Image (cartoon, rainbow, N blue to C red):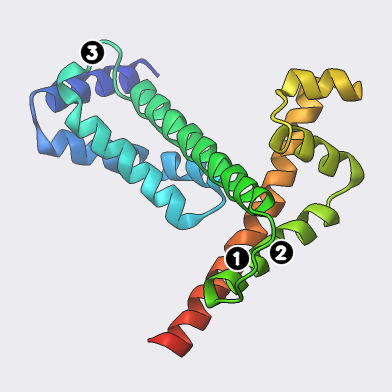
Amino acid sequence: MESKINNDQILATRLKNGDHSAFEELYATYNQLLYSVAFKYLKSAAAAEDAVHETFVRLWTHRDGLDPLQGVRNYLFKTLKFHILNLIRNNKRMLVKNYEISYNAGEIHQETESSIIFNDYKKAVDTAINSLSTQKKHIFKLKSEQGLSNEEVAQRLGLSINTVKFQYSQASKTLKSVLKLLFTFTVIVYKLFFL
């Protein structure tokens, strides 16, 4: 174990000095391990590959700030962790924003192509929300429509904060998958008829 640590420290020193072969060794050593972790959380091969790529790009661009005594392993895993958390947070924000836009838009009187697509999205979102269990639906609406925090929802419903977080996460995943499918379908239809 100590030789692994020493090797990591040696590679960190070489990398800090701009040694490309040290970077290649680190990539060969940690690429698959980082990919496995990323795939576990992102559930997408492409997203996991992108996350690992971004992690190694960040390692190379910030190599001057590396502490050789700390090695590289912890740096790589922390960078990957923060990248994954940012992706998850941004996806959740996008989902909530899409839901709020469709929920608050009201009725559209013009039956143009864009309004038809919008209405299809709104119907799909409403159907997806209505397909949720009563508790998930209630939690999702309290957080998304009323803007309550996890703590406020938990207190109002007499649930633990972790239950609220989990139920909201599950509801968000359901809605995200529905929107993703609908978006893919819309792009295909657009390409078939308009290009």
What distance separates the C-alpha of mark 2 from that of mark 3? 51 Å
Badge 3: how crowded within 10 Å, few (<14), some, or many (20+)? Answer: some
Q: Nearer the viewer, mark 2 or mark 3?
A: 2
Position of residue 170 relative to residue 81, above or below, is below
On the image, the x and y values in percent for residue 148 come to: 72, 26
Left or right: 25, with 117 as reference point:
left
Identity, as a three-letter code, of the amino acid under mark 1: Phe
Depth check, front residue: 39 or 158: 158
Q: Quadrant of residue 172?
A: top right
* Residue 159 visible (yes or no): no
Depth check, front residue: 23 or 146: 146
Mark 2 vs mark 1: which is more N-terminal? 1
Identity, as a three-letter code, of the amino acid under mark 3: Asp
At x 29%, y 18%, the residue is 71
Mark 2 vs mark 3: which is more N-terminal? 3
Left or right: 89, with 51 as reference point:
right
Left or right: 141, with 27 as reference point:
right
Secondary structure of the residue carrying tag 1 is helix
- Residue topped by disc 1: 118
